[in-house]
Image (cartoon, grey):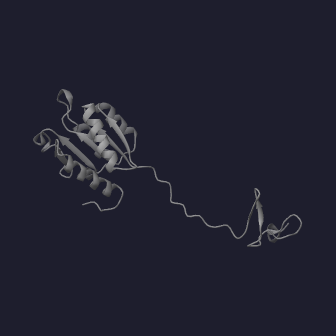
């Protein structure tokens, strides 16, 4: 058999005739196969949400789900668990309360996020006392006073646009 014989059928008939009907499970199809355009598979964007108050954390997740449609949002109320998830996972954004229980702050989580490639412009920090976070946060981390929900919503929209490439980094 030569390379020229590959387009021959068993009876010597050509199987490369464009437009020739062939059997496809009972349906007669004609013409050359159509090309299909596929978008490359992308994993969904992911964000960590940390607030030590479970009710506030759930409320924030509800707001974030509306504004970060299609994202995977992982909710944490415990700082060490959030840090472990960040170390072992892939995340695009961080939403966190600054002042946590027992005098803790989310500063260690923010440092780990920066070390793992989350841009400071993809972080939102909220707090009951914005003065607590001054001097601790990188300048491009957005810090919001609770309960300024409108400012938080605007920050989430901006993060989505940055992460999804709709606007460039500042």
> Which residue is depicted at the point 17% across and 42% down?
147
**Residue 73 is drawn in which quadrant?**
top left
The front one of 5 and 128 is: 128
Q: Which residue occupies 20% across, 38% down?
A: 98
**Residue 84 percent across, percent down from the top left:** 35, 34
Residue 147 appearing in the image: yes
Quarter holding residue 87: top left
- In the rendered structure, the answer to whether residue 74 lies left or right of residue 102 reads right
Q: Please report the residue visible at 26 percent of the width from the left and 48 percent of the height from the top.
A: 123
| The one of 49 and 65 positioned closer to us in this rendering | 65
Identify the image quadrant of the C terminus.
bottom left
Tell me the quarter of the image containing the N terminus.
Answer: bottom right
**Is 94 placed above or below 40 here?**
above
Left or right for 145, reference 88: left
Disc tally is 0
Work out which residue is located at the far front of the displayed protein and give it.
27
Q: Position of residue 89 (x, y in %)?
A: 40, 41
Residue 2 image position (x, y, % from top left): 83, 69
Q: Residue at x 24, y 46 (%)?
A: 124
Locate residue 145, reporting x and y percent. Answer: 15, 43
Q: Residue furthest top?
A: 102
Question: In this picture, is 72 found above or below 165?
Answer: above
Whether residue 116 appears in this view of the structure is: no
Relative side of 9 to 121, left or right: right
Q: Is residue 30 above or below residue 149?
A: below
Is 19 or 106 nearer to us in this picture?
Answer: 19
Seen as rendered, the residue at the extreme left is: 131
């Amino acid at each position: 058999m030569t390379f020229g014989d590959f387009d021959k059928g068993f009876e010597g008939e050509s199987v490369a005739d464009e437009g020739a009907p062939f059997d496809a499970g009972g349906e007669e199809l004609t013409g050359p196969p159509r090309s299909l355009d596929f978008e490359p598979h992308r994993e969904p964007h992911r964000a960590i949400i940390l607030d030590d108050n479970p009710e506030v954390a759930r409320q924030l997740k509800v707001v974030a789900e509306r504004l970060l449609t299609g994202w995977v949002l992982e909710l944490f109320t415990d700082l060490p668990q959030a840090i472990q998830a960040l170390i072992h996972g892939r995340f695009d954004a961080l939403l966190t309360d600054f002042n946590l229980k027992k005098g803790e702050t989310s500063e260690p989580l923010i440092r780990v996020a920066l070390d793992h490639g989350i841009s400071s412009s993809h972080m939102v920090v909220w707090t009951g006392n914005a003065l607590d976070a001054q001097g601790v946060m990188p300048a491009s981390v957005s810090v919001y006073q609770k309960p300024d929900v409108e400012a938080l919503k605007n920050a989430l929209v901006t993060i989505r646009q940055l992460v999804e490439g709709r606007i460039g980094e500042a």
